[in-house]
Amino acid sequence: MITTSPLDNLHFDNRFLRELPGDTENINLPRQVSEACYSKVLPTAVSEPQLVAYSPETAALLDLPDSVCQSEDFLQVFAGNRLANGMESYAMCYGGHQFGNWAGQLGDGRAINLGELQNQRGEHWALQLKGAGPTPYSRRADGLAVLRSSIREFLCSEAMHHLGVPTTRALSVINTGEKVLRDMFYDGNPKLEPGAVVCRVAPSFTRFGNFELFSSRGEINVLKQLLDFTIRTDFPHLGEPSTATYLAWFSEVCQRTATMIVHWQRVGFVHGVMNTDNMSILGLTIDYGPYGWLENFDLNWTPNTTDAGGRRYRYGNQPSIAYWNLAQLANAIFPLIDEVEPLQQALKTYKDHFESGWQAMMANKLGLKAFATATDNDLCTELLSILQMAETDMPIFYRQLAKLPLDLGLTDDALIAPLANAFYLPETLSADYQTRLAAWLRVYIQRLQTDAQPEASRRQQMDAVNPKYVLRNYLAQQAIDLAEQGDNTMVLDLLELLRHPYDEQPDKQSYAEKRPDWARHKAGCSMLSCSS
Ligand code: AMP
Ligand code: MG
């Protein structure tokens, strides 16, 4: 075939589509789809696509040079106006537990897969457009996404990657030129907002909920096909599918999930909607909706207004929710194993892996050579209580902690001084609080002295895991406000800034500052609704 677009010369190997059963009906209307892993569906064309941003690193995974990403054809393909050669589009069928309740069939209601690109290194990367129009899984919604939530997903996926947190990636965010109606505050005042499409990229987008749906319907044959496929494609090191392999697979999913959650707790990321349909079987952060970043450290904080009542998905609850979600996955694959005991054993690996991962993570955050249970459990418990007591900016606190002079002779005031900038309301710190913080700092200094690490290497260890820059909620909102006016510069600035979140970037210091007071209760800066 003679073509002029480089996008038509990519290699697609659409295994999910080829090897798994698909929907036998071909009607793009909301409906229940049985005995199928996907439905073929085309993206809806849009009128005036405009590039907001693309990620050069994600493009590189797909062998796409800048010249291609800046081309008109890129815009057409990744806005959903044209399928490139080799692309075959489909929406995946899955279910899920939402806020603890079984919700039945959900599926890709506004995500349309374009196929699996095989790059020059032989890696498979599934491409998925989010916001590209209705699918059989759209239920009563429109299949679209607005610019604000699309920018949030785009920036956060890339920021998480550079922070070292397992995540799906984002290739591009494109303003569609269409308007989308959203009632952002669910208060009966819908507004037209700019629409957008993000192209997500991951080795696979399979979720816990894919397995749950087939199991719940008794479609055990499809369940088995999906699990065998998943093992062969994404877990080939486990060997050919068998009961033992299924267990090894589940155990690996438990471990990967534990690793992901340890990272979330480390950087202060709160997902906001840890429903089982939003849990990747690869242990990747997936489905960036009303997520948020801890600014003031608060174990009880949830960014999601829909979650404000029960706070199920609050920061401090993420580790146990992941466990609960894994238990649902265990239930889902039970028909293929028929024994409870080994699944329970595997589930326990989550707890063990999380515990040891959390300890190693805290040791790094505090600059300890290794976590010593005898002393460091108490050290960490007391630190978390102290952080919770006064409004304390988490990123600033840990960065400043690395600069603490290890001098037990200092007064309380002098000890606390390097941390002063981390407090939101420094004038309200009580004498008791300051005494308690200073006491903790003394215990911490003594603990560091037993390690006798050179100061420079301790600082380096701490700065490598305590980010200087995160996607602060108000920064994302400022970038969005500008982009909605047609100015994408701050989106690009943040994308660039967050490529090096652990480095000091002196000319970017303003992006490391505490949340300003005006942002404390502003929509998008403190709390988000699911409307997106
Ligand atoms: P989420 O809370 O984003 O994980 O979405 C839960 C379910 O609702 C998934 O099946 C989504 O695909 C679907 N969904 C969310 N928003 C829309 C929308 N605007 N149009 C169609 N489906 C949607
Ligand atoms: Mg979802």
Image (cartoon, rainbow, N blue to C red):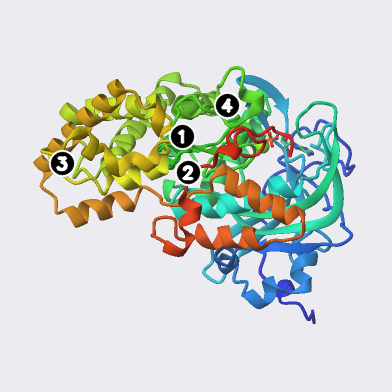
Q: CA distance from mark 4 to mark 3?
A: 46 Å
Residue shown at the point (80%, 82%) measured from the top left? 2
Q: Which residue is mark 3?
A: 448
Q: Which residue is the extreme one toward the front?
A: 427
- Residue 31: give x, y in percent of width and height: 85, 32
Residue 296 tag number: 1
| Circle nearer the N terminus (2, 3) | 3
Q: CA distance from mark 4 to mark 1?
A: 38 Å
Q: Nearer the viewer, mark 4 or mark 2?
A: 2
- Dot 1: element: loop
Residue 514 tag number: 2
Residue contact at pointers 4 and 1, CB within 8 angstroms: no
Task: Name the side, left or right, on which 515 lies relative to 433.
Answer: right
Residue contact at pointers 2 and 1, CB within 8 angstroms: no
Q: CA distance from mark 2 to mark 3?
A: 28 Å
Residue 140 tag number: none
In the displayed structure, 99 sits above or below 130; it is above
Residue shown at the point (55%, 38%) measured from the top left? 517
Task: Judge by depth and name the residue closer to the eye, 111 or 219.
Answer: 111
- Residue 50: give x, y in percent of width and height: 78, 63
Neighbour tally class for label 1: few under 14, some 14-19, many 20 plus, Cα within 10 Å: many
Neighbour tally class for label 2: few under 14, some 14-19, many 20 plus, Cα within 10 Å: many
Instruction: Indicate which quadrant contains ligand 1.
Output: top right
Residue shown at the point (43%, 46%) measured from the top left? 238
Q: CA distance from mark 4 to mark 2?
A: 44 Å
Q: Nearer the viewer, mark 2 or mark 1?
A: 2
The quadrant of the image that shows the N terminus is: bottom right
Neighbour tally class for label 4: few under 14, some 14-19, many 20 plus, Cα within 10 Å: many
